Each structure stands twice: as C-alpha cells, then as structure tokens.
Amino acid sequence: MKAVTSNNYRARIDRVLAHLAAHLDADLSLAELARIAHFSPYHFHRMFRAMTGESVAALVRRLRLETAGRALRERDRSVTDVALEAGYGSPEAFTHAFQQAFGAAPSDYRRAVVAPRYLPPLSLELTLDRATMRLSLEPFGSTDMDVTIEVFPDRSAACLRHVGPYDHAGPTYERVLRWAATAGLLERDAVVMGLSYDDPGAVAENALRYDVCFGLAEPVALPVEFRLETVRGGRYAVHTLRGPYSGIHDAFRRLFGKWLPTSGEEVDNRPCLELHMSRPTEVPESERLTKVCVLLRNKSPRSTTEPTPDARAVGPVPGVVIGSSEGRRQISRRLRQALETRR
C-alpha cells in the first residue's frame, strides 16, 4: 500500500464531504464537486461512490433528512417549516421521504424516546458526526484484489451501442457475435470488448451508454447501426474476474474504491473496458473469464535536468547546468567538501 497516495485520495474525497455538509441548500453539480476533489469529471462520481459506498445524491438526501430529524427534536419548528428548510416543496413529499428513511412519520420521530436510525445504515466507509452533520472517510483498509498493469495496443473495432441497464446488454452482444460469425470473423483469438461510459450511480438506468465491440484485424463492411471505432490502448489496471457477468459491477467498484486509492496511479478520462476471454456458449457461467480494465494515466519520466537529492543537499552550483557531466563532477566535489566540513 502506498500511504501517501492513499491519504491523498482520502483528503480529496474529504474535501467534497466537507463541501456537501456546508452547502446542503445549494445546487451541487458533479462538475463542481469534481473540481473541488481535483478528479476528472469523467470518473469523479464512480470514484466517489466506490470510496464512500453511496452516490452524491444519496448522501445529500441523507444529510438533509438527518438535519431535519435533528431540527424536529431540538427546535420548536412545524413540520412544514422543517420540510421547506430541507428542500422539499411540500410537507407531504417531506413526510414520505422521511418515513422511508427513518421508518417513522416526522411527528412520531419527534415524540420517540429514542430517535429511530436512518435506513439503510451508513456504509462502513463513512462516519457521521451528527452534531455537525460532518461526514468523514474511515482509513483505507487493504484489498485482496489481484490487479496487474498491462499495456494494450489501440484496437480497431466494430461497435454497436446499447442504451439502458448494463445487465440488459446481452441481446446486443448476441447481435454482434451473430454478425461476426456470418462474416467469418469469429476466430478462436477474436477480441470481444465492452465499453461502459456512465456510472450507474449518477445516470438513470435507461440512459446508460454501453458499446459492444468486436476487434478487427482488417477493414470490413459494417451493417447499419454498427460503427467503426478505435478502442484506445495504453496502460490499464486489469483484474481478471472468474464467474458470472453479474460480478463485473462489483469488480469495477472495488477497482475504483479499494485498489486505485492505494496504487499510486491516476485514472484516465476514458470508458471502463471489459475484455471477454471466454465464449458464454462454451463454458459454464462459474468459469467465465472477464478482464475488468481501467485506463491509467501515463507516468511522466523524471526530468534529466531535475536536481538529484545530492544536488539539493549541497545547493546549486553557480554557472553549471544540472545534469551535465561537468555539473555532476562539481556537485560531487561540493558534496565531499560538505561531508568533510561536518566531520
């Protein structure tokens, strides 16, 4: 585990949690929250939900209703006033939401000897100080996820778009594979991919975008609705999932929420990638292999003109370009002189 990176990710999400608590009555856009966290808007919400266990909308709703519950018990305010303060347009809408959250109507909650708890309970990743309504992340634990870094080439692919719940993409896969078989392309080493563009926690299920892609070794004529795309290569964090496709969502959640914050890596602004290594018709569901992949940013090589630790210890050498042969010789002399002076 890389503690510095882990703490960095935690601090960035904590900044967002503090902002949410301080601006519950504001219109909180995901783009603004991503800016506060210094995360890419493309993957911010996926990171946030994976690390906190809840979506931004769910956490804001929780904080507003928890604040309303405290107002009901500690302040002599009408249910209507508390409802309006919590951002609800009518007492009826507030009562419905409140009863769903606490299992009790606002009036019953106010009179209860022991206030009912919000349901479902807060995820184990978070703690809530009910005096201040301040959320904070628990320290990161280790993850037993087996993740490797693999470099993939750019791939030309025939892609077909599915819009709707990700777990309803089966018919789109079937259509792509039927076309590939008819075109004589379904070889043993055929590359079948899935690209998920949206986070299910931030986008309505019926609007989720997903591409089923079939790798092409050479140009071919494509049917109507198919698109020729280049699936971007690069450095990917890869976890090989064995089992049913229903485990893909959880695998991505753990990649973003558990592995990435402790990895020393930064995610790039690209769709999540699935590589299907097994043919569903040939292996039982429990033996299917799927590579769950997240594109990473390239790490910048260290500059050859950057001062070495020794150079920083003895200070700059006037008139010498750091990194040159003469510079290194003068730095070595200065270092020896500094050490002899300290003896």
Image (cartoon, grey):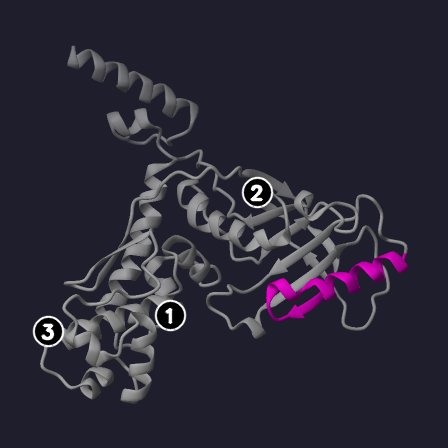
In the foreground, 302 or 256: 256
The disc label shown at residue 57, or none:
1
- Segment colored magenta: 160-183
The residue positioned 43% from the left and 62% from the top of the image is 45
Element carrying mark 2: strand
Q: Circle 2 sits on which residue?
A: 239
Kind of residue indicated by mark 3: Glu
* In-front residue for pair 28/88: 88
Instruction: Please state which amino acid type lies under the numbered disc 2.
Output: His
Left or right of 24 on screen, residue 298: right
Give the dominant element type of the magenta stretch: helix, strand or loop.
helix
Q: For the N terminus, give its image quadrant.
A: top left
Displayed quadrant of residue 173: bottom right
Q: Which residue is drawn at 32% across and 60% down?
A: 121
What residue did someone put label 3 on? 74
Q: What element carries label 3?
A: helix
Q: What is the three-letter code of the residue carrying label 1?
A: Ala
